[in-house]
Amino acid sequence: MKRGWRRAGQAVVFALLAGAAAITLVPMVWLLAASLKRPEDLFTYTFFAPRITFESFRDLFTKEPFARYLVNSVFVTSTVVCAQLFFSSLAGFALAKYAFRGKRLVMLVMVSTMLIPGQVVMAPLYELLFRLGLVDRHLGLIVPGAVSVFGIFLFRQAMLQTPDELLDAARIDGCTEFRIYWDVIMPVSRPMVGAFCLMSFMGSWNNFLWPQILLHGSDRFTLPIALNQMIGIYQQQYGMLMAGTLLSVLPVIALFLLLQKEFVAGLTAGAVKG
Amino acid sequence: MFRLQHRLAPYLFVAPFVLLFVSFGLYPIVKSLALSLYATNGPRDAVFVGLANFRFLLSDPDFHTAVLNTVEFALWSIFLQLPLALGLALLLSARWLRGREALRLAFFSPNLVGQVFVGVLFSVLFVPQYGLLNRVLHALFGVPLDTNWLANPRLVMPALVITSLWMYVGYNMIYFLAALQAVERDLYEAALVDGANPWQRFRVVTLPGIKPVAVFVLITSTIGSFQLFELPYIMLGNSAGPDNAGLTIVMYLYNNGFVTGDLGYASAVGWTLALGLLVISLFQMRITGAWRGASE
């Protein structure tokens, strides 16, 4: 008898959770439906219309230079991710596995600046980039974004756990220190590499405020800025807007599905251990 | 030769980071302190004004509005969003539950959509007449179809809270789930043997077990809430909304610093935000007893 009640309770909890999960997914399903509707169906059908069309996607590339925005975003993001990955893991490796003068100072400065929100540096950074001639250039997004203090901590944390014997064995075999980084420690840290790549990708891909400040010419716009401009023009005929949003979100979802396991591990590594 | 490259290696490894960090991280931080004492017009023209930026800031009614809105949003995050995230995590960590992986993924998935894209999507969902939200609310509760969420000063904040719930509940849930998995099962069994009821088990075993993570989530999500900018800026059509109902501190910084070109003022707003966040974080650590936990 008691067991029956427990079963019923579990069924209710499951139903509630499944319902909440379904509600969570509704906006995304609606997004997909809206980008596949014909303009005349936009206001007639709440979700999918009986006839689907790719018109909105076609308009996106013909009426707007969407391909340009896509290329800009892909270029900026992939450069930033590669640079952050390389510099952060290299510095994280040095901080995890070497004793050197000034190490404590580097760590201390890193920790204290992590507490300062990014908005503080925006004004002087703009001034600096203006003097370097990097305003309204993609380099102005890439160069200041090339290192991630958070990333250095993640890699240091992961690399601390690699046994020193592994590195010493490679040294006896005649590996240079850089070879050890490249051929020994990076392959061992693969889960963290995956997690960091996704976090860094999302950060750069979705970045809005800094590009909004820095970029003026529309041929240099990244997707977030371009879509923000499009809202003003297409809010009534929102099919194109939704198609653009869908295309902007798909790369992140694809990458997430690829790196899911590593991502969750990396996300919580800082909180649980730190 | 071998010794030399071994000794030099760490310096070479941190060199690119240190170089970039000093020029684009540390230098701007120091520079912004100085800059906050100047009135500027674009990057080229600056006049020393002492603390006038801060005096003006603290007496500007728009800044007061921005602070009040931001604080209200942060309170919703702390007292509505985080408990929901913890509740979901508790339910989802039940071992008998089927399809846990799929449910977790569903709740987390909105976070993959960046703030800007969420803003674009929800600005359409909140539209009167045809917007999905109004249709659903109309069908279920008879809410009028012409409710204009983003044009009504009293509905702007609820719209922002709903949107951020959608985006962040699942995200914080992941942290709580990880923390719950780390709580030792023996402690639960010991509490069961002692005859503790579910609430007592939660208070005596679960809560202390997840405390370090909970404090981390509390502090980071408070900091995140205080930096709110993209959601209202996009949803309200690059404005502060009706009666400045969606004006936040960072939006105030952007509008008064970058749109008008007063980089000195932008720095002053930035440092005011930084100091405020520092005080709030320290306060949160104190009342949650995070220091006591750390020193034990």
Image (cartoon, coloured by chain):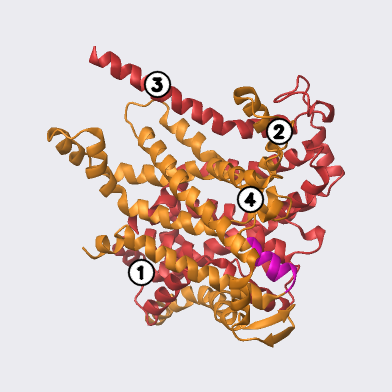
Chain colours: A red, B orange
Between marks 4 and 1, how big is the CA–CA gap? Answer: 42 Å
| Residue placed under numbered mark 3 in the picture | A12
In the drawing, what numbered circle is on residue B131? 2
Mark 4 and mark 1 on one chain: no
Query: Hey, what amino acid is under mark 3?
Result: Val
From this viewpoint, which residue is outermost toward the bottom? B48
Instruction: Give the alpha-carbon distance from disc 3 to disc 1, as whole Å.
Output: 52 Å
Q: Quadrant of residue A130?
A: bottom right
Q: Do labels 4 and 2 share a chain?
A: yes
Between A25 and B145, the one lying in front of the other is B145
Q: Please tell me if label 2 and label 1 are on a single chain.
A: no
Residues tagged 4 and 1 counted as in contact (Cβ below 8 A) = no
Provide the secondary structure element on which disc 3 rests: helix
Visible in this render: residue A245?
yes
Where residue B201 appears, x then y in whole percent? 23, 38
The residue that label 1 is drawn on is A97
Among the two numbered marks 3 and 1 on one chain, the one whose residue lies closer to the N terminus: 3
Q: Which chain carries label 4?
A: B
Task: Give the mark toward the camera: 3 or 2.
Answer: 2
Measuring from the top left, give residue B58's x and y in whole percent. 58, 72
For the residues beneath circles 3 and 2, the answer to whether they share a chain is no
- Which residues are drawn in magenta? B251-261
On residue B231, the disc is 4
Label 3 Cα crowd, 10 Å radius (few <14 / some 14-19 / many 20+): few
- Contact between marks 3 and 1 (CB within 8 A): the answer is no
Q: Are marks 3 and 4 on the same chain?
A: no
Dot 4: what SS? helix
Rate crowding at label 2 as few (under 14), some (14 to 19) or many (20 or more) other CA atoms within 10 Å: many
**Disc 3 vs disc 4: Cβ atoms closer than 8 Å?**
no
